[in-house]
Image: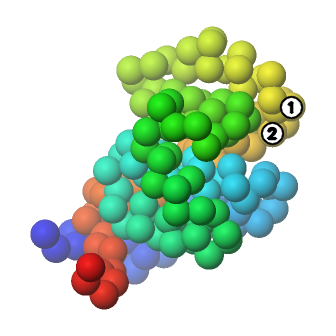
Amino acid sequence: MHQRVDYMKAAPDAFKAVYELEQYVSAKSGLEARLIHLLKLRASQINGCAYCVDMHSKEARKDGLSEQWIALICVWREASVFDARERAVLAWTEALTNLAETGAPDAEFDELRRHFSEEEIVKLSVAIGTINIWNRLAVGFRTRHEVDIAA
């Protein structure tokens, strides 16, 4: 599999716009880094984006999140390492990432509302939308992740 398009070079203005949104989410939104890592990893897993799963799992490790916490995101419903706030973010991430199938159910929104303000919910939703844009670019254009030293 080879990269279809270098989207950064092909449309630098579009790339810059998405990058600026990313900068807001990651550095200016005020959201906890832990929650941003969580939603980025879960959305990227759902979307099958190896590039983003690789990048964001490395970033999460660098920020001190445990191997167990990172590894269990894909099976979060059965894992005991996530608190109620994290579970609400994971459920909302799945609901928005799979929007055509879920329609963003009231149950997931109501649970999110128990833990977050309206402002935080909007910011979390923008963060989920942003990682979904990156996933669509990386998967759609076949962006390859680097291979570390073989296991």
Asked if residue 120 can be seen in this view, the reply is yes
Q: Are marks 2 and 1 in contact (CB under 8 Å)?
A: yes
Residue 120 is tagged as 2
**Amino acid type, mark 2:** Glu
Q: Nearer the viewer, residue 12 or 64?
A: 64
| Mark 2 neighbour density, 10 Å: few (under 14) some (14–19) many (20 or more) | some
| Residue at image coords 64%, 48% | 127
Q: Note whether 120 is above or below 34 in the view shown.
A: above
Task: Find residue 61 and report its horizontal and vertical position in percent.
Answer: 58, 70
Q: Note whether 101 is above or below 84 in the view shown.
A: above
**Amino acid type, mark 1:** Ser
- Looking at the rendered structure, the secondary structure element under dot 2 is helix
| Residue at image coords 37%, 67% | 51
Asked if residue 132 can be seen in this view, the reply is no
Q: Note whether 76 is above or below 57 in the view shown.
A: above
Look at the image and tell me in which quarter the C terminus lies. Answer: bottom left
Task: Find residue 80 and report its horizontal and vertical position in percent.
Answer: 58, 37
Q: Nearer the viewer, residue 120 or 68?
A: 68
- Looking at the rendered structure, the secondary structure element under dot 1 is loop
| Residue at image coords 63%, 12% | 106
- For the residues labelled 2 and 1, the Cα–Cα distance comes to 5 Å
The mark total stands at 2
Residue 68 is tagged as none
| Mark 1 neighbour density, 10 Å: few (under 14) some (14–19) many (20 or more) | few
Look at the image and tell me in which quarter the N terminus lies. Answer: bottom left
Task: Find residue 132 and report its horizontal and vertical position in percent.
Answer: 48, 48
In the rendered image, which residue does mark 1 sit on?
117
State the image quarter where residue 36 is shown.
bottom right
